Structures are given as C-alpha cells and as structure tokens.
Image (cartoon, rainbow, N blue to C red):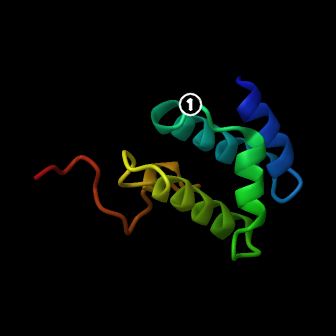
Amino acid sequence: MSDLTDDLADAFGERTDADTAQAAAENVQSFAEQYDEELTSEAVLDRFEGAPYADFREAFNWLVGDLAADNEDCTDSREFRIEGYGPFGADPTITG
C-alpha cells in the first residue's frame, strides 16, 4: 500500500469502520493514480473536513466529486465513491 492509502485509512478510520475506511482510502489512491499523482493526504483531509455532510459516506462521496470537479480530465467520479457506480448509476460498459 502507498503512504497515501495508509494515511487516509488511518484518518478515515476515526470516522467510520475499518473496512469502509480502507475502501475509501483505496478509492482516493485510485483517483490519484489516474488523475492527480501530486495529491497528498493532507489536501484530501482538508477537503474532507469541509464536506457539507456529517455522514461519512455522504461526505466521502462529496469529496470525490469535489476532487473530480477540480480535474478537467475526470468527467465521472462515480467509480471512486464508496458504493462505486451504485444500482441507480449509469452502466459504465455502455458506450455511445
């Protein structure tokens, strides 16, 4: 695991269960690998603290949307959410 994943899993673990914290940290790591290799745990945690939700899952899903909004190459942040695309999301295998 990377330092980013380890740092975030520890920090997220203070707000949710260990499995959810680990999944969230790995999702941020995936986002960083694909879109923002300079992303730091401090930057992520600062944004996360500013989330307009108290519930961890809602706050985390907001966080990945906010990270994606700042990155013009990421047009769909759903794969990085806690639930991934979810049952009501578009099917990512369907292309135009």
* Image coords of residue 37 (percent x, y): 56, 30
Could you say which is closer to the camera, residue 87 or residue 47? 47
Disc 1 element: loop
**Most extreme residue toward the left, as rendered?**
96
Q: Is residue 52 above or below residue 65?
A: below
Classify residue 91 as left or right of residue 73.
Answer: left
Q: Residue 14 occupies which quadrant of the picture?
A: bottom right
Classify residue 90 as left or right of residue 70.
Answer: left
Classify residue 52 as left or right of residue 31.
Answer: right
Could you say which is closer to the camera, residue 14 or residue 70? 70
Q: Residue at x 70, y 38 (%)?
A: 40
Q: Residue 2 occupies which quadrant of the picture?
A: top right
Picture mark count: 1
Q: Residue at x 10, y 53 (%)?
A: 96
Give the amino acid type for the residue marked by disc 1 in the picture. Answer: Glu
Question: Looking at the figure, which quarter contains the N terminus?
Answer: top right
Q: Residue at x 70, y 58 (%)?
A: 47
* Image coords of residue 12 (percent x, y): 80, 51
Q: Is residue 45 above or below residue 65?
A: above
Q: Is residue 14 above or below residue 37?
A: below
Circle 1 residue: 37
Q: Is residue 62 visible?
A: yes
Q: Residue at x 61, y 32 (%)?
A: 38
**Most extreme residue toward the right, as rendered?**
14
* Image coords of residue 63 (percent x, y): 62, 60
